[in-house]
Amino acid sequence: MLKIYNALTQKKEEFKPINDNIVNFYLCGPTVYDIPHLGHGRSAVAFDVIRRYLIYKGYKVNFVTNYTDIDDKMINRANEKNISVSQLADEIIPVYKSDYEALKVLPPDSQPLATEYIDSIIDIIKILEEKGATYKLDDGIYFDISKFPEYGKLSKQKLEDLHNGVRVELNDKKRSFQDFVLWKFEKPGEPSWDSKWGKGRPGWHIECSAMSTSILGKSIDIHGGGADLMFPHHECEIAQSETANGQMFVKYWIHNAFVNVNKEKMSKSLGNFVTLSDLLKKYKGTVLRYLYLQTHHRAPINFTPELIDQAKQSLERIHGFVRNLFVDKRKGGLTDKIAEIIKKADEKFNKGMDNDFDTSEALASVFDLIKNINLYQKNKELTDSDQKAVIDHFKKLDTVFAFLFPETHAELTEELMSLINERETARNNKDWQKADEIRNKLLDRGIVLEDTPKGTIWIRKD
């Protein structure tokens, strides 16, 4: 039974989608004013694994994540670079796509831009206005939080304690310091759109409400994002969405924790700002993915050079195990002892993931299996059926992890496996000419063979 920690109730709950087997899932995406850093990667990978595990469990997942392409930060950075806001988005978005692909993050089912939903944004503001939940000031249209008595129910803080983290322009004319802007009136040189209130642009919070409800509906199953988004962003999304629609906005709220660098919050001013692009020049994306997933998504990560090197070594151990599995095996059926090892590993994996997507426990199941199988591998006691069963188990788990197999293609084809085993047989028969022919044939296919005392292992050329 899958249990999820719901930030709204602050407890683990049995996961029950609103609509039978369908899961509508929205993740707050990045504001694309700068290239992605370690924190962006963590959020992307954490929610990718949650999505993958829901699919693994048999749910039909409709996964949406956005790009915020109009925002104060976008405007300021575009001005610094002397380009338009849309040009800045066109420059930054491909970097996100490339870096996330390297991290093995599945493409979303839909990835809207905030600027594509201006009409939906305006429609929601109109509804809020009709319900008396807005008011006009000289710089824009504001949401009146007094019209939503439950404001603060997600962050569990009193209004007087909620001063920090407010991402709105200060305006001392507001009825409450927590009232937030829905529509900002046009300023010289800024992008703007027509509306009944005059030309302007949307506030930050209303963008995600419009995109999520337009694509997934007024009530969705899961809404995710970084812990820094709980307040004010997610709190404001709830207030405006539930006021406009008169029903529950999100059933389960999930947040991932921060990534610190050498025990300090990552920031450019401290000189510890780490981009994904820089790391991906030195490490494969699967190494970073492993680094993220060895820690539960709700626990902070303290990034250090030692940590990523340890992640690389751990991943190499897994890949070395997989390569050794392709060494020639004796013929035979699946043995009871191997079947039991796989069964226990499978149970531990599912138990971990069912416990609020505990990837650290799920990964432990992989190393338990490696340790136990290696005892039989060392003595050449594995049959070809044992080998296939272990590989099949890894294939299944890798639909969630996406890093268990050594290379991009995840596994060798049956044809390549057959050639490797055929060459091992030729070597055992001292048929060196045939062994060399097969080695060269595999090399042409991008497979490098390494002969070891235990047998032959393979490495795919980069």
Image: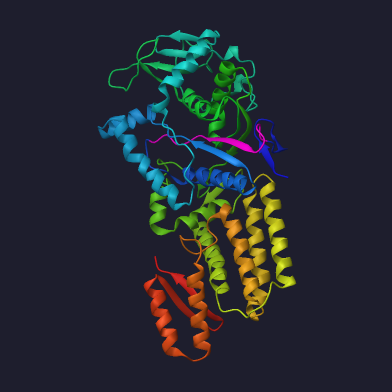
Viewer can see residue 130: yes
Left or right? Give the position of 70 relative to 392. Answer: left
Q: Quadrant of residue 146?
A: top right
Name above or below for residue 78 compared with residue 97.
Answer: above
Decide whether residue 263 is among the magenta residues.
no
Residue 277 is situated, as x and y percent measured from the top left of the image, at: 39, 50
**Looking at the image, how many numbered discs can be counted on the residues?**
0
Q: Quadrant of residue 374?
A: bottom right
Q: Residue furthest bottom?
A: 430
Q: Quadrant of the N terminus?
A: top right
Name above or below for residue 456 compared with residue 402.
Answer: below
Colour scheme: rainbow
Residue 306 is situated, as x and y percent measured from the top left of the image, at: 51, 59
Q: Residue at x 43, y 80 (%)?
A: 438
Front-most of 225 and 61? 61
Decide whether residue 22 is among the magenta residues.
yes
Dominant SS type (magenta)? loop
Q: Quadrant of the C terminus?
A: bottom left
Front-most of 439 and 347? 439
Residue span colored magenta:
17-32
Name above or below for residue 263 compared with residue 283.
Answer: above
Viewer can see residue 170: no
Residue 360 is situated, as x and y percent measured from the top left of the image, at: 63, 53
Q: Residue at x 69, y 47 (%)?
A: 354
Residue 173 is situated, as x and y percent measured from the top left of the image, at: 46, 9
